[in-house]
């Protein structure tokens, strides 16, 4: 039976996943982590076949953790969970090495299908995203400015989009205020923006604001 690690800092999400997977005899939740450090520690001392990984993790983002996991645990499958609109972060996650991407508000049957598909060694994206990717290939567009941001810069941009202050972002991500301020300056430069208000407007306009904290 495959072992599954849930990595999500929201207790309600973890509880929901436990209830969903409990009746499934071919799936077993081996452990839970609330942040990147816990996930890495658990993976280093136990056998895990699949990680259900939240994109918005405290301390280090799920995307940043993805890169690390791919290097340190290349055999572990990674299914990303997020409330972000698929078109904004799914491709970024897949390029970073995710085995699949699914929205947290997907129907339970779709999540179970995604888990089993990824465990079988295949990639998973929703039909909606697959159709969008096919359309983008048929009619390629210019890259959006935020696509050049690093994983951490992208995460901080999304938090500014929620109206979070520098201090709030620093606390949530376990960073210093000066560090977040430096990230803010880099993001403004890369996006050719001047103020935090413009950052917020940009994030909202490009559907980068996750509806669930």
Image (tube, helix red, strand yellow):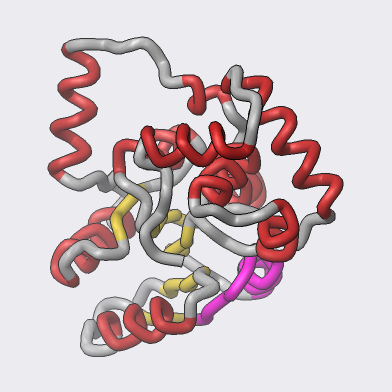
**Visible residue check, residue 73:** no
Kindly identify the residue that appears in the image at 30 percent across and 37 percent down: 87
Q: Which residues are magenta?
A: 31-45
Picture coordinates of residue 66, whole percent (x, y): 56, 48
Kindly identify the residue that appears in the image at 14 percent across and 69 percent down: 109
Q: Is residue 62 above or below residue 109?
A: above
Q: Is residue 54 above or below residue 192?
A: below
| The N terminus sits in image quarter | bottom left
- 8 vs 205, nearest the viewer: 205
Q: Is residue 69 above or below residue 129?
A: below
Picture coordinates of residue 47, whole percent (x, y): 55, 71
Picture coordinates of residue 204, whole percent (x, y): 40, 41
Residue 61 on the magenta segment? no
**Visible residue check, residue 18:** yes
Picture coordinates of residue 146, whole percent (x, y): 50, 27
- 160 vs 122, nearest the viewer: 160
Residue 41 on the magenta segment? yes
Side (left or right) of 122 relative to 181: left
Kindly identify the residue that appears in the image at 29 percent across and 62 percent down: 115
Q: Main secondary structure of the magenta part?
A: helix
- 6 vs 13, nearest the viewer: 13
């Amino acid at each position: 039976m495959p072992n599954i690690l849930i990595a999500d800092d929201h207790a309600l999400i973890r509880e929901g996943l436990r209830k969903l997977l409990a009746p499934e005899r071919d799936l077993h939740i081996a452990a839970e982590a609330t942040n990147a450090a816990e996930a890495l520690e658990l993976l280093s001392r136990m056998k895990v076949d699949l990680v259900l990984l939240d994109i918005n993790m405290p301390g280090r983002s799920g995307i940043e953790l993805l890169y690390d996991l791919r290097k340190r645990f290349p055999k572990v499958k990674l299914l990303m969970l997020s409330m972000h609109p698929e078109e904004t972060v799914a491709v970024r996650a897949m390029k970073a090495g995710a085995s699949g991407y699914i929205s947290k508000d997907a129907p339970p049957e779709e999540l179970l299908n995604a888990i089993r598909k990824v465990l079988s060694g295949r990639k998973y994206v929703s039909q909606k995203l697959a159709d969008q990717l096919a359309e983008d290939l048929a009619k390629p567009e210019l890259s959006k400015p935020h696509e050049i941001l690093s994983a951490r810069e992208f995460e901080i941009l999304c938090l500014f989009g929620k109206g979070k202050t520098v201090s709030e972002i620093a606390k949530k991500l376990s960073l210093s205020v000066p560090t977040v301020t430096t990230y803010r300056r880099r993001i403004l430069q890369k996006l050719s923006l001047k103020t935090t208000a413009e950052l917020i407007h940009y994030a909202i306009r490009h559907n980068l604001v996750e509806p669930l904290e």
